[in-house]
Image (cartoon, rainbow, N blue to C red):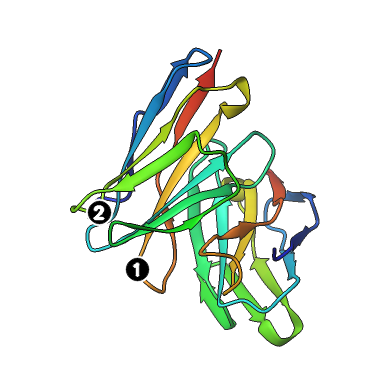
Amino acid sequence: DAGVTQSPTHLIKTRGQQVTLRCSPISGHKSVSWYQQVLGQGPQFIFQYYEKEERGRGNFPDRFSARQFPNYSSELNVNALLLGDSALYLCASSLEPGPYTFGSGTRLTVV
Amino acid sequence: GIQVEQSPPDLILQEGANSTLRCNFSDSVNNLQWFHQNPWGQLINLFYIPSGTKQNGRLSATTVATERYSLLYISSSQTTDSGVYFCAVENSNSGYALNFGKGTSLLVTP
């Protein structure tokens, strides 16, 4: 069974640009969460979606948005990129309740 | 929000040694998970353990929810155990967020 897949794996963007990151959960998992991890720190919660509805939002600016599709895949969008948005973006899926399975992440570099 | 403290922050072991990692949290939880992040950034779920004890091979974990701590035991460590170990918790006040500690960085030497 395929795990959580994220695309792209690496991305380089210029300040002010917009980026879209994609995530496909494990089959049967309806909950998808997004986390940002900067170097040397633990992951920080951005969003959780469940059954296509936003169920939780972390302390991130409105430049960050997300959505979940009918097949439970998800996209994270970041507008007006800043240098400080450079990080590893992680997607996780889970059953409710249950352990989170994380994807390999998208490493975003903003120059 | 709920605070998560992990100790020790850094640990160096020789192959074959045993270790105990600790996670303290500031409030009651309904979700506690241990993860291992390898040098390539992949986060691997080790245990989903809001309470009780679980074992998986050389690893075991215990969560004492009433005393607000969890322990991760690694026995007969191997070089492949190197990486960062994170404890993450969630409760009814965290808005569906898993709150991660700062991690324990483990290096196992041959």
Task: Indicate the secondary structure of the residue bearing disc 1.
Answer: loop
Between B34 and A12, the residue placed more toward the observer is A12
The percent coordinates of residue B90 (x first, y second) are 58, 68
Task: Indicate the secondary structure of the residue bearing disc 2.
Answer: loop
What mark, if any, has residue A95 been given in the picture? 1
Can residue A30 be seen here? yes
Count up the numbered dots.
2
Report the chain holding disc 1.
A
Instruction: Describe residue B48's horizontal placement relative to residue A95 as left or right.
Output: right
Report the chain holding disc 2.
A
When the figure is inspected, residue B42 is found, relative to residue B89, above or below; the finding is: above
Between A85 and A57, the residue placed more toward the observer is A57
Callout 2, which amino acid?
Tyr
Q: Quadrant of residue B88?
A: bottom right
When the figure is inspected, residue A13 is found, relative to residue A32, above or below; the finding is: above
Q: Residue at x 48, y 43 (%)?
A: B42
Badge 1 local density, few (<14 within 10 Å), some, or many (20+)?
Answer: some
Quarter of the picture containing the N terminus of chain A is bottom left
Instruction: Describe residue B54's horizontal placement relative to residue B27 as left or right.
Output: left
Q: Residue at x 62, y 35 (%)?
A: A38
Q: How far separated are the C-alphas under marks 1 and 2? A: 12 Å
Mark 1 or 2 closer to N-term?
A: 2
Callout 1, which amino acid?
Leu
The percent coordinates of residue B50 (x first, y second) are 57, 78
Residue at which label 2 appears: A72
